[in-house]
Structure formats: structure tokens, C-alpha cells
């Protein structure tokens, strides 16, 4: 497989999403008519291609696989977390005929809050800068464990949570969890 340069990848993404805009999205009420399809900041990152996509309906951080990645076997809509200097971000697997399989992290959707195309581009550039800038350890936030949360909400047994709840119940009992 021949590597595609970030510049060529950016041009392909822009062309594909311009076609999607014309053929599938035109006239939909969620579009911000002040915006156009644009790509910016596409670059090689740890063997993959990373960049920002701005459209009249959404802004996303886009990640294309590297030569050692096999994303073709991933299902459309699968989620995968990727670590960057600025934190951990969850991406969804996407597939577009002209582009193949890639992943997108939604930054904004819909795009009604942007008064101009230049404002959207400035936000996209700022977001990409934050992704690639190391954060101080105390500024990092834990990623929500969606799988664990789902198990809890479905009422499934989660031993660590069950033990913590038991300990909290014991501590809140009138005797403070101590038998007399």
C-alpha cells in the first residue's frame, strides 16, 4: 500500500465532503449557510494522517490509518479511543467510498453557533492545537468508561462497584459500619 501524503489526503477529504454537501446535505435545515467545506492542519502523526474537517453541518478531527493499521475490519460506528498529547479522544469508525475507512472525533455538530467561515476555521485550528499540545498532568481528565457505565445502568454485577457501594452503605449506617 502506497502512503498518501497529508496534502493529498486533505484534498481528497475536501472533495468527498463537498460532494456529500451537494448531493446529500443540500437544503437541510441543520446547515449553517455561512460555512463551506474545508480541511486544515492535515499532517502525519505517529504513522497516521490527522487533520480537521469543517463542513456546514459538523466539525471533526479526522484520523486515517497508518500502514500497520487494519481498520477495514472494524464496523461502521465502532468507537475507538486514541491518545494524543492533549488527552484521550473517542473516535467513530466511518467509511466514505472515495476515502475508505477512517475515524472521526466530533468537535461540533450542528454548526449554528459559528457566525462566519473564518470563525469556524479559527475554532478548528485552536482545537487541533489543543489536541497536539501536552497538557499538565493535573489538567488531564479521566475518560468516561462507557462500557462500565453501560454495565452499571443495565444492572449487571460489577464486583469493584458492588464492593464500593457496600463499603459506602456500611459507612453510612448509624454505627458507622462498626458492629457493637
Image (spheres, rainbow, N blue to C red):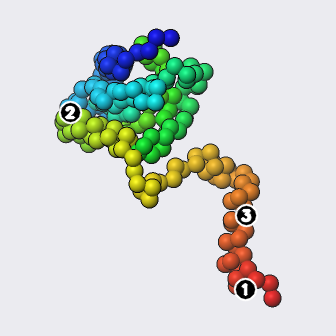
Residue 126 in picture, x, y percent from top left? 28, 41
Lateral position of residue 158 relative to residue 44, left or right: right
Mark 2 or 3, closer to the camera: 3
Mark 2 Cα shell of 10 Å, populated few (<14), some (14-19), many (≥20): some
**Badge 2 vs badge 3, beta-carbon distance below 8 Å:** no
Label 1 to label 2, Cα distance in Å? 63 Å
Q: Residue furthest top?
A: 2
Q: Residue furthest bottom?
A: 180
On the question of residue 58 being in view, the answer is no
Mark 3 Cα shell of 10 Å, populated few (<14), some (14-19), many (≥20): few
Q: Earlier in the sequence, mark 3 or mark 1?
A: 3
On the question of residue 30 being in view, the answer is yes
Q: Residue at x 32, y 40 (%)?
A: 129
- Picture layout, residue 139 above or below residue 18: below
Residue 119 in picture, x, y percent from top left? 21, 39
Q: Earlier in the sequence, mark 1 or mark 2?
A: 2
**Secondary structure beneath disc 2?**
helix
Residue placed under numbered mark 2 in the picture: 117
Residue placed under numbered mark 1 in the picture: 175
Where is the C terminus found, in terms of image quarters?
bottom right
Find residue 43 and report its image quarter: top left
Amino acid at each position: 500500500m502506497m502512503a498518501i501524503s497529508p496534502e493529498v489526503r486533505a484534498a481528497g477529504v475536501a472533495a468527498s465532503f463537498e460532494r456529500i454537501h451537494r448531493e446529500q446535505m443540500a437544503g437541510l435545515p441543520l446547515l449553517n449557510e455561512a460555512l463551506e467545506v474545508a480541511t486544515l492542519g492535515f499532517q502525519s502523526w505517529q504513522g497516521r494522517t490527522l487533520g480537521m474537517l469543517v463542513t456546514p453541518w459538523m466539525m471533526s478531527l479526522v484520523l486515517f490509518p497508518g500502514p500497520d493499521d487494519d481498520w477495514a475490519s472494524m464496523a461502521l460506528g465502532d468507537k475507538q479511543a486514541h491518545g494524543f498529547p492533549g488527552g484521550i479522544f473517542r473516535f467513530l469508525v466511518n467509511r466514505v467510498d472515495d476515502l475508505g475507512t477512517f475515524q472521526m472525533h466530533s468537535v461540533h455538530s450542528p454548526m449554528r453557533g459559528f457566525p462566519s467561515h473564518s470563525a469556524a476555521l479559527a475554532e478548528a485550528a485552536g482545537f487541533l492545537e489543543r489536541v497536539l499540545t501536552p497538557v499538565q498532568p493535573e489538567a488531564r481528565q479521566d475518560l468516561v468508561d462507557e462500557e462500565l457505565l453501560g454495565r452499571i445502568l443495565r444492572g449487571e454485577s460489577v464486583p469493584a462497584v458492588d464492593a464500593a457501594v457496600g463499603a459506602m452503605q456500611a459507612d453510612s449506617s448509624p454505627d458507622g459500619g462498626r458492629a457493637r
